[in-house]
Image (tube, grey):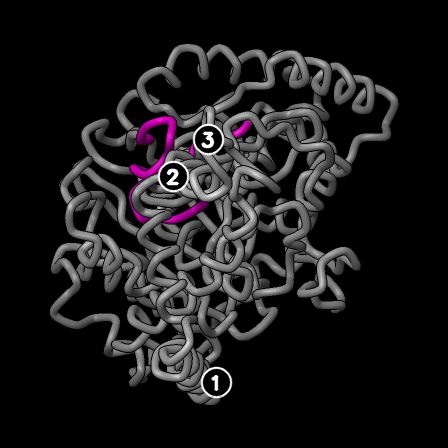
Amino acid sequence: MLDDTISQQAAALRRGDYSANELVTAYLTRIVARNGMLNAYLTVTEQAALDGARAADAALADGSAGPLTGIPIAHKDIFCTDGVRTSCASRMLDNFIAPYDATVVMRLAAAGAVVLGKTNMDEFAMGSSNETSFYGPVRNPWDSQRVPGGSSGGSAAAVAAGLCAAATGTDTGGSIRQPAALTGICGLKPTYGRVSRYGMIAFASSLDQGGPMARSAQDLALLLQAMAGFDPRDSTSIEREVPDYTAALGVSLQGLRIGLPREYFDAGLDPAVGDAVRAALAELERLGATLVDISLPHTHLSVPAYYVVAPAEASSNLARYDGVRYGYRCDNPADLQDLYQRSRSEGFGAEVKRRILIGTYVLSAGYYDAYYLKAQRVRRLIRNDFLEAFGQVDVIAGPTVPGPAFRLGERSNDPVAMYLSDIYTLAVNLAGLPGLSVPCGLVQGLPVGLQLIGRDFDEASLLNVAHRYQQVTDWHLRRPPEA
């Protein structure tokens, strides 16, 4: 049952092939067996999960079950969950028990999902390898000596290793798509504003977006259906009708124009990854799509623009964690200055401090125009590139990540090399567009991903393209050796 997709599990639960209690118990057993090595979960809510399973079985029995009733999921530890520790993988929030549920958590619960626990992540979602967590790195189920990607690496590893049926993630510069690609699962970053950010601890407010991670595009559609929609408690939420994502699956690709940005197939791309992506594109062409060469000329500016905008917003958002208003407080401070300095110094990790310093610098008097304002202008150029491209094509496709998962510690002392891991995903966040990663091959026994980028609020097209691809391929069905 743990190898089934969400839709298969939902059907099996309704047929009575197994109960929600049996399904949840099976996942909890696997978590006990595998989480010690993977470090994918920070908190396992065993009793709450078993209580949820009993309620799900009752709903299934009396006919009141929702679309996700009895489906065991996990939440990234960046989403507030009522009565459960929400640490953001930081010492700063190590003892924070959230007093309410994030909107995403509430909506998935209303759809019937059963929560197994909270997953590990890069501290405050800052990282591309899941090595910056205060609680230690997550390991890739395909090779325990390699990273799972970040910052939703715990969620990705949990899904890939069969420690949950699906999980939530957040994507500020590729943090859903990149770990999805490196662990061989599917991940969707919706359009900015499509999924509520209420109750999601902020990193960079104009870039952060929550989304689903699962084993198939069909599963992503089921999850997004529950998560999406206007939320009056989030001022960035967009009041726009949510389409039926599952009903849109299976539409023919005949006549669909897929743009291939030449900047995404340059010298920085691992040749073997490039071959896998091109093979996937050829499959889409056989399904009826037309491949069109396009250019996104400002792609090379996405990394520098992102690493000005994101740290600037992070430095502002994280100013509240000072040991007085929120977060960790140092022991026996000598005076107020000592309290602030030591609380923040001891509470934050190195990567978070680096980004706060960068952000504070680019926002400071005399440098705001030179860096932050210029980066925002570059951001506009990047979005204009996409808008112009979508005048020629319906969907844009390319690699999700330049290479397969790298070894733990390999890039820890080279932040620039680490930042380049997200070179193909950052522009999507700067432009606010939806992006999706699906498994499309193995390189040296490690998964690689195909990235699909769509117009604003056109998640349905991305899910349909991915679903059609998965109907004729089996990369999404491959499992890590021990899963």
Cβ atoms under marks 1 and 3 closer than 8 Å: no
Is residue 175 shown above or below 146?
Answer: below
Q: Quadrant of the C terminus?
A: top left
Callout in the foreground (2, 3): 3
Was residue 134 drawn as part of the magenta stretch in this picture? yes
User: Disc 3 marks which residue?
Assistant: 333
* Image spot of residue 250 (x, y percent): 56, 58
* Image spot of residue 448 (x, y percent): 27, 49
Circle 3: element type: loop
Circle 2: element type: helix
Callout in the foreground (2, 1): 2
User: Disc 1 marks which residue?
Assistant: 387
Callout in the foreground (1, 3): 3
Q: Residue at x 35, y 67 (%)?
A: 361
Was residue 339 drawn as part of the magenta stretch in this picture? no
Identify the amino acid type marked 1. Answer: Leu
Of marks 2 and 3, which one's residue comes earlier in the chain?
2
Neighbourhood count class around disc 1 (C-alpha, 10 Å): few under 14, some 14–19, many 20 upward: some
Is residue 191 shown above or below 181?
Answer: below
Neighbourhood count class around disc 2 (C-alpha, 10 Å): few under 14, some 14–19, many 20 upward: many
* Image spot of residue 471 (x, y percent): 45, 50
Identify the amino acid type marked 2. Answer: Gly
Cβ atoms under marks 2 and 1 closer than 8 Å: no
**In this picture, which residue range is highlighted in magenta?**
118-138
Q: Residue at x 31, y 18 (%)?
A: 37
Circle 1: element type: helix
Identify the amino acid type marked 3. Answer: Pro
Of marks 1 and 3, which one's residue comes earlier in the chain?
3
Tell me the CA gap for discs 1 and 3.
Answer: 53 Å
Q: Residue at x 45, y 14 (%)?
A: 30
Find residue 392 and report its image quarter: bottom left
